[in-house]
Amino acid sequence: MRKMKNLVAIMALCVMTLHANAQQEEVTPKNSWFKFGINAGVPVGDVSDISSFVGGVELKGQLMTTPHWGLGLTAGYNHFFPKDNFESFGTVPVGAFVRYYPQSSGFFAGLDGGYSFVTNANGADGGAFFKPQLGYHNYSWNYFAYYNTILRSDNKGGNIDNVGVGVTYNIRFKK
């Protein structure tokens, strides 16, 4: 129950932040869009003992609050493929993100954060997640490298960490 309250608080904060920015900024096809992407990585830390590969999808909604800063909401699914004698499991991240774009095309840095649920893992709990990213962007695409961590206590199975690469495509709204 406490985790759900934390998730609701995080999501409420994200929605209030986006709403406040939308009140000051007119939402148009030039400053707002969806991002759909895929990613692939390798588990690191303790989870690398039971899983050999991670593949995932993500959907984001982004609002450019200035020419250089983007804010948004994110959700997705990551599947951890098992090593021999182990079961596969998944994570479902739900949260917010911030991006810094120094130029209209080129380098970017970002951070996703929120709560990630764990699926198909015999009652395993999720935890807060953080996903810093560095990459390259242009009008339609974002290519990036990331480190993803889901913070959990040792008695809950420890952190779930992976590193990888991903790509998102910007789905623009019609005028």
Image (tube, rainbow, N blue to C red):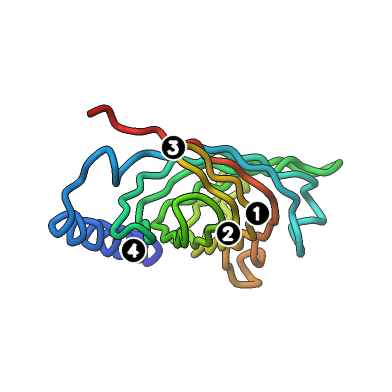
Q: Residue at x 29, y 32 (%)?
A: 173
Q: Quadrant of residue 81?
A: top right
Q: Which residue is mark 2?
A: 133
Q: Is residue 114 above or below residue 164?
A: below
2 and 4 marks in contact (CB < 8 Å) = no
> In front here: 23 or 1?
23
Q: Which residue is mark 3?
A: 170
Query: Seen in the image, is 165 located left or right of residue 14?
Result: right
Q: Is disc 4 in contact with disc 1, using a CB cutoff of under 8 Å?
A: no
Residue in view at x 35 percent, y 33 percent: 172
First in sequence, mark 3 or 1: give its number.
1
Query: Which residue is situated farthest in the right direction here?
Result: 84
Task: Return the disc, 4 or 1, that comes first in the chain's sequence.
Answer: 4
Q: Which mark is residue 145?
A: 1
Tell me whether the residue at label 2 lies in contact with that at label 1, contact meaning CB atoms closer than 8 angstroms: yes
Q: Which amino acid lies under the numbered mark 4 shown in the image of this protein?
A: Ile
Q: Is residue 29 left or right of residue 164?
A: left
Q: Which is in the foreground here, disc 2 or disc 3?
A: 3
Query: Disc 2 to disc 4, how far (Cα)?
Result: 20 Å
Looking at marks 4 and 3 on the same chain, the residue that comes earlier in the sequence is marked by 4
Q: Which residue does the numbered mark 4 point to in the structure image? A: 10
Nearer mark to the viewer, of 4 and 3: 3
**Element type where label 3 sits in the image:** strand
The crowding category of the residue bearing disc 1, from other C-alpha atoms within 10 Å (few below 14, some 14 to 19, many at least 20), is: some
Name above or below for residue 166 compared with residue 4.
above
Report whether 15 appears left or right of 104: left
Say what amino acid the circle numbered 1 marks. Answer: Ala
Q: Residues within 10 Å of mark 3 (few under 14, many from 20)?
A: some
Specify the quadrant of the image occupied by residue 60. top left
The percent coordinates of residue 26 (x first, y second) are 16, 49
Could you tell which of marks 2 and 3 lies nearer the N-terminus?
Answer: 2
